[in-house]
Protein backbone atom coordinates (compact mmCIF):
# COMPACT_ATOMS: atom_id res chain seq x y z
CA UNK A 1 0.00 0.00 0.00
CA UNK A 2 1.34 3.42 -0.95
CA UNK A 3 1.54 5.77 2.01
CA UNK A 4 1.83 9.57 2.10
CA UNK A 5 1.62 12.19 4.86
CA UNK A 6 1.38 15.80 5.85
CA UNK A 7 3.89 16.91 8.49
CA UNK A 8 3.93 20.12 10.52
CA UNK A 9 3.34 21.46 14.00
CA UNK A 10 0.56 21.84 14.95
CA UNK A 11 -1.10 19.58 12.39
CA UNK A 12 -4.57 18.74 13.75
CA UNK A 13 -6.17 21.63 11.81
CA UNK A 14 -4.81 20.47 8.42
CA UNK A 15 -7.41 19.87 5.69
CA UNK A 16 -4.91 17.87 3.60
CA UNK A 17 -6.00 14.43 4.96
CA UNK A 18 -9.60 15.23 3.94
CA UNK A 19 -8.52 16.35 0.45
CA UNK A 20 -6.24 13.38 -0.26
CA UNK A 21 -8.51 10.89 1.54
CA UNK A 22 -11.42 12.00 -0.68
CA UNK A 23 -9.32 11.53 -3.81
CA UNK A 24 -8.10 8.09 -2.65
CA UNK A 25 -11.67 6.86 -2.32
CA UNK A 26 -12.90 8.66 -5.49
CA UNK A 27 -10.23 6.94 -7.59
CA UNK A 28 -10.41 3.61 -5.71
CA UNK A 29 -6.73 3.67 -4.75
CA UNK A 30 -5.50 1.42 -1.95
CA UNK A 31 -3.33 4.08 -0.37
CA UNK A 32 -3.21 6.11 2.82
CA UNK A 33 -2.55 9.74 3.71
CA UNK A 34 -1.99 10.62 7.34
CA UNK A 35 -1.28 13.74 9.40
CA UNK A 36 1.87 13.42 11.52
CA UNK A 37 2.75 16.02 14.13
CA UNK A 38 6.48 16.71 13.70
CA UNK A 39 8.37 19.34 15.68
CA UNK A 40 11.53 20.77 14.04
CA UNK A 41 13.81 18.66 16.28
CA UNK A 42 12.05 15.46 15.16
CA UNK A 43 12.30 16.20 11.44
CA UNK A 44 15.56 14.26 10.75
CA UNK A 45 14.00 11.06 12.16
CA UNK A 46 10.93 11.46 9.94
CA UNK A 47 13.14 12.10 6.91
CA UNK A 48 15.05 8.88 7.71
CA UNK A 49 11.75 6.93 7.64
CA UNK A 50 10.96 8.52 4.30
CA UNK A 51 14.35 7.57 2.85
CA UNK A 52 13.92 4.02 4.15
CA UNK A 53 10.88 3.63 1.88
CA UNK A 54 8.07 3.80 4.43
CA UNK A 55 6.31 6.56 2.44
CA UNK A 56 6.12 7.65 -1.21
CA UNK A 57 6.27 11.25 -0.04
CA UNK A 58 4.13 13.87 1.59
CA UNK A 59 3.22 17.47 2.21
CA UNK A 60 5.05 19.86 4.50
CA UNK A 61 3.52 22.75 6.36
CA UNK A 62 4.41 25.37 9.00
CA UNK A 63 7.01 25.51 10.58
CA UNK A 64 9.00 22.95 8.52
CA UNK A 65 8.89 24.23 4.92
CA UNK A 66 12.28 25.99 4.95
CA UNK A 67 14.02 23.35 7.08
CA UNK A 68 12.88 20.56 4.73
CA UNK A 69 14.27 22.47 1.75
CA UNK A 70 17.72 22.10 3.29
CA UNK A 71 17.38 18.32 3.68
CA UNK A 72 16.38 17.35 0.11
CA UNK A 73 18.78 15.61 -2.31
CA UNK A 74 17.31 17.58 -5.16
CA UNK A 75 15.24 20.77 -5.22
CA UNK A 76 12.94 21.75 -8.03
CA UNK A 77 14.25 25.12 -9.39
CA UNK A 78 11.05 26.88 -8.32
CA UNK A 79 11.26 25.44 -4.80
CA UNK A 80 14.80 26.76 -4.73
CA UNK A 81 13.66 30.24 -5.81
CA UNK A 82 10.82 30.20 -3.28
CA UNK A 83 13.18 28.81 -0.61
CA UNK A 84 10.56 26.46 0.80
CA UNK A 85 9.25 22.94 0.12
CA UNK A 86 5.61 21.95 0.57
CA UNK A 87 5.73 18.64 -1.34
CA UNK A 88 8.20 15.77 -0.96
CA UNK A 89 8.56 12.88 -3.40
CA UNK A 90 10.88 9.88 -3.02
CA UNK A 91 12.21 8.42 -6.28
CA UNK A 92 14.98 5.79 -6.43
CA UNK A 93 15.86 6.52 -2.79
CA UNK A 94 16.34 10.19 -3.70
CA UNK A 95 14.45 12.86 -1.78
CA UNK A 96 13.03 15.52 -4.11
CA UNK A 97 11.48 18.78 -2.91
CA UNK A 98 8.86 20.84 -4.75
CA UNK A 99 6.81 23.92 -4.00
CA UNK A 100 3.32 23.60 -5.46
CA UNK A 101 1.84 26.73 -3.83
CA UNK A 102 2.51 28.71 -7.00
CA UNK A 103 0.63 26.07 -9.04
CA UNK A 104 -2.18 26.24 -6.49
CA UNK A 105 -2.41 30.00 -6.91
CA UNK A 106 -2.51 29.70 -10.72
CA UNK A 107 -4.90 26.72 -10.74
CA UNK A 108 -7.32 28.59 -8.49
CA UNK A 109 -7.42 31.71 -10.67
CA UNK A 110 -7.51 29.70 -13.92
CA UNK A 111 -10.51 27.72 -12.65
CA UNK A 112 -12.42 30.59 -11.07
CA UNK A 113 -11.49 33.57 -13.29
CA UNK A 114 -10.62 32.03 -16.68
CA UNK A 115 -8.46 34.31 -18.86
CA UNK A 116 -7.47 36.48 -15.87
CA UNK A 117 -3.85 36.91 -17.02
CA UNK A 118 -4.48 37.45 -20.76
CA UNK A 119 -4.34 41.28 -20.78
CA UNK A 120 -2.86 41.84 -17.35
CA UNK A 121 -0.03 44.40 -17.36
CA UNK A 122 0.16 45.49 -13.72
CA UNK A 123 -0.55 43.69 -10.46
CA UNK A 124 -0.35 44.55 -6.78
CA UNK A 125 0.84 41.89 -4.32
CA UNK A 126 0.23 42.65 -0.63
CA UNK A 127 2.74 41.03 1.73
CA UNK A 128 6.35 39.90 1.47
CA UNK A 129 6.41 36.67 3.49
CA UNK A 130 6.77 33.04 2.40
CA UNK A 131 3.48 32.88 0.50
CA UNK A 132 4.30 36.10 -1.39
CA UNK A 133 7.33 34.37 -2.93
CA UNK A 134 5.12 31.66 -4.43
CA UNK A 135 2.65 34.24 -5.75
CA UNK A 136 5.45 36.33 -7.29
CA UNK A 137 6.85 33.23 -9.02
CA UNK A 138 3.33 32.49 -10.33
CA UNK A 139 2.86 36.01 -11.72
CA UNK A 140 6.34 35.94 -13.23
CA UNK A 141 5.48 32.61 -14.92
CA UNK A 142 2.51 34.34 -16.58
CA UNK A 143 4.71 37.18 -17.82
CA UNK A 144 3.07 40.02 -15.88
CA UNK A 145 5.22 43.05 -16.78
CA UNK A 146 4.92 45.13 -13.60
CA UNK A 147 4.32 43.78 -10.11
CA UNK A 148 4.09 46.19 -7.18
CA UNK A 149 5.06 44.47 -3.93
CA UNK A 150 3.53 46.32 -0.97
CA UNK A 151 4.43 45.42 2.59
CA UNK A 152 4.14 46.88 6.09
CA UNK A 153 7.88 46.37 6.58
CA UNK A 154 9.40 48.02 3.52
CA UNK A 155 12.84 46.40 4.03
CA UNK A 156 11.34 42.96 3.49
CA UNK A 157 9.58 44.04 0.29
CA UNK A 158 12.84 45.53 -0.97
CA UNK A 159 14.82 42.36 -0.24
CA UNK A 160 12.24 40.12 -1.86
CA UNK A 161 11.87 42.37 -4.91
CA UNK A 162 15.65 42.33 -5.39
CA UNK A 163 15.63 38.52 -5.26
CA UNK A 164 12.78 38.23 -7.78
CA UNK A 165 14.13 40.39 -10.60
CA UNK A 166 13.38 43.70 -12.23
CA UNK A 167 9.62 43.28 -12.78
CA UNK A 168 8.94 43.47 -9.03
CA UNK A 169 8.81 46.95 -7.45
CA UNK A 170 8.73 47.35 -3.65
CA UNK A 171 6.54 49.97 -1.93
CA UNK A 172 4.89 50.62 1.44
CA UNK A 173 1.21 49.73 1.95
CA UNK A 174 0.17 53.38 1.72
CA UNK A 175 1.27 53.47 -1.94
CA UNK A 176 -1.87 51.46 -2.77
CA UNK A 177 -4.12 54.43 -3.68
CA UNK A 178 -1.48 55.80 -6.08
CA UNK A 179 -0.85 52.44 -7.80
CA UNK A 180 -4.42 51.09 -7.83
CA UNK A 181 -5.77 52.88 -10.96
CA UNK A 182 -3.44 50.84 -13.24
CA UNK A 183 -3.69 47.52 -11.42
CA UNK A 184 -5.70 44.69 -12.98
CA UNK A 185 -5.07 42.30 -10.10
CA UNK A 186 -4.69 42.60 -6.32
CA UNK A 187 -3.47 39.52 -4.46
CA UNK A 188 -3.37 39.54 -0.66
CA UNK A 189 -0.65 37.24 0.68
CA UNK A 190 -0.45 38.75 4.17
CA UNK A 191 -2.11 37.04 7.11
CA UNK A 192 -4.48 40.02 7.42
CA UNK A 193 -8.01 38.73 6.93
CA UNK A 194 -7.61 35.73 9.18
CA UNK A 195 -10.35 35.71 11.79
CA UNK A 196 -11.96 38.79 10.26
CA UNK A 197 -9.07 41.26 10.59
CA UNK A 198 -8.93 43.88 7.84
CA UNK A 199 -6.59 46.39 6.20
CA UNK A 200 -6.95 49.93 7.48
CA UNK A 201 -7.68 52.37 4.66
CA UNK A 202 -6.93 50.25 1.57
CA UNK A 203 -8.60 52.33 -1.14
CA UNK A 204 -10.07 49.61 -3.37
CA UNK A 205 -12.34 52.21 -4.98
CA UNK A 206 -9.31 53.46 -6.94
CA UNK A 207 -9.03 50.14 -8.81
CA UNK A 208 -10.37 49.83 -12.37
CA UNK A 209 -13.88 48.33 -12.45
CA UNK A 210 -12.44 45.32 -14.30
CA UNK A 211 -9.88 44.49 -11.58
CA UNK A 212 -9.75 41.07 -9.95
CA UNK A 213 -9.14 40.84 -6.19
CA UNK A 214 -7.93 37.57 -4.67
CA UNK A 215 -7.01 36.59 -1.14
CA UNK A 216 -4.96 33.54 -0.22
CA UNK A 217 -6.36 33.58 3.33
CA UNK A 218 -9.37 31.21 3.37
CA UNK A 219 -10.53 31.38 7.01
CA UNK A 220 -12.96 33.07 6.78
CA UNK A 221 -13.74 32.25 3.16
CA UNK A 222 -14.88 35.80 2.51
CA UNK A 223 -12.28 38.02 4.12
CA UNK A 224 -13.08 41.70 4.79
CA UNK A 225 -10.90 42.53 1.73
CA UNK A 226 -13.00 40.30 -0.55
CA UNK A 227 -16.26 41.55 0.97
CA UNK A 228 -15.22 45.13 0.30
CA UNK A 229 -14.18 44.31 -3.29
CA UNK A 230 -17.44 42.48 -3.93
CA UNK A 231 -19.45 45.43 -2.55
CA UNK A 232 -17.66 47.65 -5.08
CA UNK A 233 -18.67 45.29 -7.92
CA UNK A 234 -15.14 43.96 -8.47
CA UNK A 235 -14.45 40.30 -9.38
CA UNK A 236 -13.16 38.22 -6.48
CA UNK A 237 -11.61 34.77 -5.99
CA UNK A 238 -11.18 33.32 -2.48
CA UNK A 239 -8.16 31.37 -1.22
CA UNK A 240 -9.70 27.93 -0.73
CA UNK A 241 -9.08 26.93 -4.35
CA UNK A 242 -5.35 27.56 -3.87
CA UNK A 243 -5.28 25.01 -1.05
CA UNK A 244 -7.14 22.46 -3.20
CA UNK A 245 -5.04 23.00 -6.34
CA UNK A 246 -1.66 22.94 -4.57
CA UNK A 247 -2.51 19.35 -3.54
CA UNK A 248 -2.88 18.07 -7.13
CA UNK A 249 0.80 17.56 -8.14
CA UNK A 250 1.67 15.68 -4.93
CA UNK A 251 -1.24 13.26 -5.24
CA UNK A 252 -0.30 12.57 -8.86
CA UNK A 253 3.36 11.94 -7.98
CA UNK A 254 2.59 9.54 -5.08
CA UNK A 255 -0.48 7.70 -6.34
CA UNK A 256 -0.15 7.95 -10.15
CA UNK A 257 -3.50 9.63 -10.90
CA UNK A 258 -3.96 13.32 -11.63
CA UNK A 259 -6.93 14.21 -9.41
CA UNK A 260 -9.61 16.75 -10.19
CA UNK A 261 -10.64 19.70 -8.02
CA UNK A 262 -14.42 19.33 -8.18
CA UNK A 263 -17.24 21.41 -6.63
CA UNK A 264 -18.00 18.38 -4.42
CA UNK A 265 -14.45 18.35 -3.01
CA UNK A 266 -14.61 22.08 -2.42
CA UNK A 267 -17.95 21.73 -0.60
CA UNK A 268 -16.54 19.00 1.65
CA UNK A 269 -13.56 21.14 2.68
CA UNK A 270 -15.65 24.32 2.92
CA UNK A 271 -17.91 22.58 5.45
CA UNK A 272 -14.91 22.27 7.82
CA UNK A 273 -13.99 25.98 7.82
P1 LIG B 1 4.53 35.05 6.75
O1 LIG B 1 5.74 34.56 6.02
O2 LIG B 1 4.52 35.06 8.24
O3 LIG B 1 4.21 36.54 6.19
C1 LIG B 1 3.19 37.31 6.77
C2 LIG B 1 2.97 38.59 5.96
O4 LIG B 1 1.82 39.25 6.50
C3 LIG B 1 4.14 39.57 6.01
O5 LIG B 1 4.22 40.27 4.79
C4 LIG B 1 3.68 40.52 7.14
O6 LIG B 1 4.23 41.83 7.04
C5 LIG B 1 2.20 40.59 6.88
N1 LIG B 1 1.42 41.00 8.06
C6 LIG B 1 1.11 40.23 9.13
N2 LIG B 1 0.38 40.95 10.02
C7 LIG B 1 0.25 42.20 9.50
C8 LIG B 1 -0.39 43.40 9.94
N3 LIG B 1 -1.08 43.45 11.10
N4 LIG B 1 -0.36 44.49 9.13
C9 LIG B 1 0.30 44.45 7.95
N5 LIG B 1 0.95 43.35 7.48
C10 LIG B 1 0.92 42.23 8.24
O7 LIG B 1 3.23 34.17 6.34
P2 LIG B 1 3.00 33.35 4.98
O8 LIG B 1 3.54 31.99 5.13
O9 LIG B 1 3.46 34.21 3.85
O10 LIG B 1 1.40 33.20 4.98
C11 LIG B 1 0.55 34.34 4.86
C12 LIG B 1 -0.90 33.87 4.85
O11 LIG B 1 -1.16 33.10 3.68
C13 LIG B 1 -1.29 32.99 6.03
O12 LIG B 1 -2.53 33.42 6.53
C14 LIG B 1 -1.41 31.59 5.42
O13 LIG B 1 -2.38 30.80 6.10
C15 LIG B 1 -1.88 31.93 4.01
N6 LIG B 1 -1.56 30.86 3.02
C16 LIG B 1 -2.58 30.33 2.30
C17 LIG B 1 -2.29 29.35 1.35
C18 LIG B 1 -3.43 28.72 0.56
O14 LIG B 1 -3.24 27.60 0.06
N7 LIG B 1 -4.55 29.38 0.39
C19 LIG B 1 -0.97 28.94 1.12
C20 LIG B 1 0.06 29.53 1.87
C21 LIG B 1 -0.25 30.51 2.83
P3 LIG B 1 5.63 42.21 7.76
O15 LIG B 1 6.71 41.75 6.81
O16 LIG B 1 5.57 43.68 7.89
O17 LIG B 1 5.66 41.50 9.07
Image (spheres, rainbow, N blue to C red):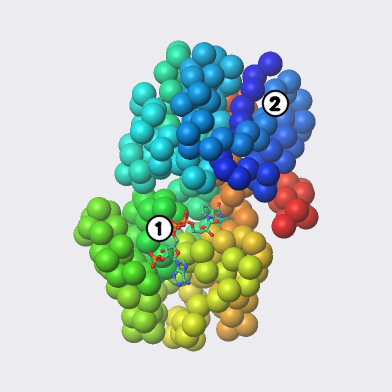
User: Do residues under tags 1 and 2 come within 8 Å of each other at their CB atoms?
Assistant: no
Q: Residue at x 30, y 62 (%)?
A: 156
Looking at marks 1 and 2 on the same chain, the residue that comes earlier in the sequence is marked by: 2
Q: Secondary structure at mark 1?
A: loop
10 Å crowding of disc 2: few (<14), some (14-19), many (20+): some
Quickly name the residue at label 2: 32
Q: Which image quarter holds the N terminus?
A: top right
Say which of 28 and 17 sits in front.
17
Among the 4 quarters of the image, the one containing residue 246: top right
Say which of 37 and 82 sits in front.
37
Left or right of 262? Residue 178 is left
Percent position of residue 8, x then y = 56, 40
From where the camera sits, is residue 245 visible? yes
CA–CA distance in space, label 1 to label 2: 32 Å
Left or right of 205? Residue 262 is right
Q: Residue at x 34, y 69 (%)?
A: 153
Question: Which mark is in front, 1 or 2?
Answer: 1
Task: Tell me: is circle 1 under 8 Å from ligand 1.
Answer: yes
Q: Which image quarter holds the C terminus?
A: bottom right
10 Å crowding of disc 1: few (<14), some (14-19), many (20+): some
Quickly name the residue at label 1: 129
Residue 98, above or below 82: above
Amino acid sequence: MIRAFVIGHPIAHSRSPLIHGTWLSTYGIAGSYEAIDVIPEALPALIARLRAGEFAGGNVTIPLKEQVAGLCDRLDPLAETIGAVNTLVVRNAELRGFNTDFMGFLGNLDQNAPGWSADLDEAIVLGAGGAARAVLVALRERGIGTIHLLNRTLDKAQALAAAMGNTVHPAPLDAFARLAPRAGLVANTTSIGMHGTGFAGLALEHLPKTALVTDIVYVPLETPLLACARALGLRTVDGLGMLLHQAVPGFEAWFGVRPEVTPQLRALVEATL
